Image: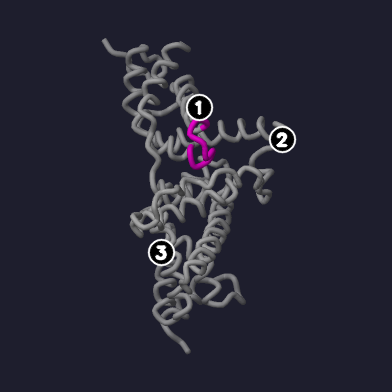
Amino acid sequence: MSEQTGKQLSKEEKDARFEAELLPVLAPLYNFAYRLTLDEDDANDLVQETYLKAYRFFDYFEQGTNAKAWLFRILKNSFINEFRKKSKQPAKVDYSEVEGYYNTDDVEGEGGVASTSDMRTESVQDLIGDEVASALNALPVDFRTVIILCDLEGFTYEEMAKILDIPIGTVRSRLHRARNSLKEKLEEYAKSMGYNS
Amino acid sequence: METGFTEAYKKMSEEGNETDCEKVAGILDLVIDGEASSEEQYFFNSHIEECVPCFESHQKQRLLKSIISGHLKRVIVPERLAHSIKTRIQETV
C-alpha cells in the first residue's frame, strides 16, 4: 500500500524522489554557486547547504514542477544570507532594497578561471571562453547572476523573477545593464587585441 | 515614408515620441531572449530589415549571448559532492 498524499511520504519514498528530481540539478547548481562565489570551497558549501534545506522543505516542493528554479532560488537566498554575514550588512536589508547598489568589493579577487596555460597551444575558442569568464567574473554579482541565469542556464524572465524575488521589469533592466557592462569589458579586450568593432 | 513597419509601430505604440530605433533598442533583449510578443517580434523584424544600425546592434547582442552560452566553460563538479550531500542528509535526519 503506497501513500499518495505527498505530505506523508515514507522516508524511502522521500529519499528516492529527492534523488530522482533534485540531484540531476547538481551540475548547473554547482556552476551557479561557483560563478557567484568564485571559490570552489564556498561553492561546495553553498551547494550542500542548498540541498540540506531542500531536503528539509521537500514536502513543500510540488512534484513535477520546476525543480531547477526551486533549487536555484534556495541557493541564491543562501548566498545572500552568507554574503550579508560576511560583509556585516544589517540582516533586515531586503535584496530588493539594495537594487541599484552594487557592492564591488567581492569581484576583484581571483582572475577568474583564466589560467596560465601556454597561449600558443590554446585554441581561439578557449581564449574566448577565458576572456568571457574573466569579464563576467569582473561584473558586480547582481549583474553576473542575471547573465548566468538567462544566457547560460536558459531561465525565462518569469523564472528569473521568482528565483531572484524581483519584478520582471527589474529582471529586464538589470539584464540590460549587465549586458552593456559586459560588452564594454569585452570591447576593451577586443581593442587591446587589435580588433576594432 | 509609410511602410509596413511604421504602420505596425503606430498600431501598437502608446509612447508617443519614441522613435522606432529607440523602441527597437527597448525590445532588443526581449527578442534575443525569446520573450517578445508576436507583435513586438514583427515590429522588430520589419525595422531591422531597413535600418542598418539596429540590424548591427541586433547582430552584436546575439553574438554576445551566444558567446556566453557557447564558450563559457562549465566547472567540473567535485566527485565527492553528491556523496557528501547524501551523507549529510542522512546524518541530519
Tally of marks: 3
Chain on which label 3 sits: B
Q: Residue at x 33, y 16 (%)?
A: A13
Range of residues picked out in magenta? A34-42
Measured as percent of width and height from the top left, residue A157 is found at 48, 50
In the foreground, B10 or A173: A173
- SS category of the residue bearing label 2: loop
Q: Which residue is mark 2?
A: A89
SS assignment at label 3: helix
The amino acid on which the numbered mark 2 sits, given as a three-letter code, is Gln
Q: At which x and y percent is residue A110? A: 55, 44
Classify A128 as above or below A38: below
Residue located beneath label 3 in the image: B63
| Circle 1 chain | A
- The amino acid sitting under disc 3 is Leu
Kind of element beneath mark 1 = helix
Judge the density around disc 2: few (<14), some (14-19), many (≥20) Cα neighbours within 10 Å.
few
Marks 2 and 1 sit apart, C-alpha to C-alpha, by 21 Å
Residue A177 occupies which quadrant of the picture?
bottom right
Dot label at residue A177: none
Q: Tell me the distance, in whole angstroms, between the alpha carbons under discs 3 and 1.
A: 34 Å
The amino acid type found where label 1 is placed reads Asp
**Same chain? Circles 3 and 1:** no
Real-space CA distance between mark 2 and mark 3, rounded to the nearest whole angstrom: 38 Å
Residue A34 visible here:
yes
> Is residue A37 shown in magenta?
yes
Residue on which the image places disc 1? A45
Do circles 2 and 3 both sit on a common chain? no
On the image, the x and y values in percent for residue A187 come to 51, 66
Other-residue count near label 3 (Cα within 10 Å), few / some / many at <14 / 14–19 / ≥20? some
Q: Callout 1: few (<14), some (14-19), or many (20+) C-alpha neighbours within 10 Å?
A: some
2 or 1: tag closer to the N-terminus: 1
